[in-house]
Amino acid sequence: MTDRVLLTGISGFLGGHVALELLGAGYTVRGSVRNLSRTDKVRATLQRAGADISRLEFVALDLERDKGWDEAMEGVRFLQHTASPFVLQMPPDKNELIRPAVEGTERALNAALAANVERVVLTSSMAAIAYGHDKSRTAPFTANDWTNLEGRGVTPYTESKTLAERRAWEIMRAAGRETDLATINPSGIFGPLLDEDPGTSATLVQRLMNGSVPAAPRIPLVAIDVRDVARAHLAAMISPEAGGHRFPMGERTMFFAEVAAILRQAFPAHARKIPRRELADWMVRIYGLFDKDVRSNLGELGVLKRLDSSAATRLLGRELIPADASFIATGESLIAHGLV
């Protein structure tokens, strides 16, 4: 009998890639979905990506409900908790993001501890590390940094990821098992899509390619490839040295105009729709009055953030996939699925 891993959020962009890594490494994967009606689609998606789905199971779990968590942990050796709400547009009530993120983490980790699961890997974010700080900071953010929730520009999403990760460490510390938790803290995740759902990060590339962004806002993107993030989840689960540590992951920081230039060169047939000009900040603020996605990210105008990913590269045993390749892989997927 192979070791079983409970993977929450298996139907998501990252969750699907983590499932591929786990199945490829020989694990039995018990994936959680909110509704079991989605399981056929997830099976077909993973099989199409080359996975052996004979070791794939499903369970219905809700981040905001107690039902099923203890049963889902039966026979599980490891927990991979990737499920958490992620949006571009901030909701009117910030608790729409904070409550499921924090309560879902509490339910997952408490059930894992009750079942004596060996290692927990939590998908956190650079949102829990690099926000609310002085905008003049030029030094890379490290695993020792935490987002300052009292600082400027903190969004409900940033708050949700920070509070959820802090709660995870509190739970494990109180149980005397802090070294059995590892967190992966990626930046914006790009790379090949597994299905026709662009998710959140790929929507940024989609908008650059489909003509809906007339000019590029001077908003920086910190990018990481989904394949690296998924492999880091597996490595953090099986590496004894990974326990008790956070792993920031961001390969490169660039402005939207730089990303647009990469896409224009890679996809000449779509170049006409990809913006060539960069909007002045004052114009972006005006544009944000009419575009909710832009309005939700105005606090990032011109603010360059970099992540120290050295711990992640040591964990993986190699350099990270270049951001250029990640954006191109995203574009290729969007075209293949007819999304641009």
Image (tube, helix red, strand yellow):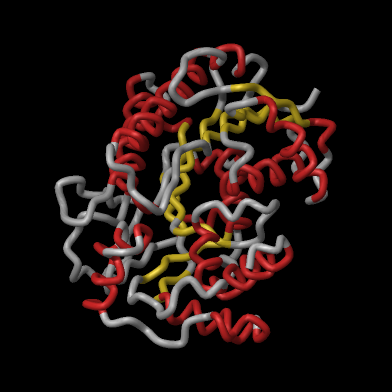
Q: Quadrant of residue 324?
A: bottom right
Please indicate whether residue 337 sits to the left or right of residue 242 in the image. Answer: right
**Residue at x 62% of width, y 43% of height:** 234
Is residue 88 or residue 169 the one in the foreground? Answer: 88
Count of all numbered marks drawn on residues in the image? 0
Name the outermost residue toward the front.
290
Q: How far from the left and from the top, in percent, is residue 211?
A: 52, 75
Give above or below for 38 relative to 303.
Answer: above
Q: How far from the left and from the top, in percent, is residue 164?
A: 35, 35
**Residue at x 27% of width, y 74% of height:** 302
Instruction: Kindly tell me whether residue 7 is visible in this rendering.
Output: yes
Q: How far from the left and from the top, in percent, is residue 287?
A: 30, 71
Is residue 61 or residue 284 the one in the foreground? Answer: 284
Please indicate whether residue 158 sits to the left or right of residue 248 in the image. Answer: left
**Residue at x 46% of width, y 24% of height:** 109
**Residue at x 35% of width, y 63% of height:** 291
Give above or below for 25 relative to 99.
Answer: below
Q: Quadrant of the C terminus?
A: bottom right
Give above or below for 210 relative to 107.
Answer: below
Q: Quadrant of the N terminus?
A: top right
Give above or below for 296 relative to 280.
Answer: above
Is residue 257 or residue 2 the one in the foreground? Answer: 257
Q: Quadrant of residue 217?
A: bottom left
Instruction: Kindly tell me whether residue 316 is visible in this rendering.
Output: no
Q: How far from the left and from the top, in percent, is residue 195?
A: 70, 51
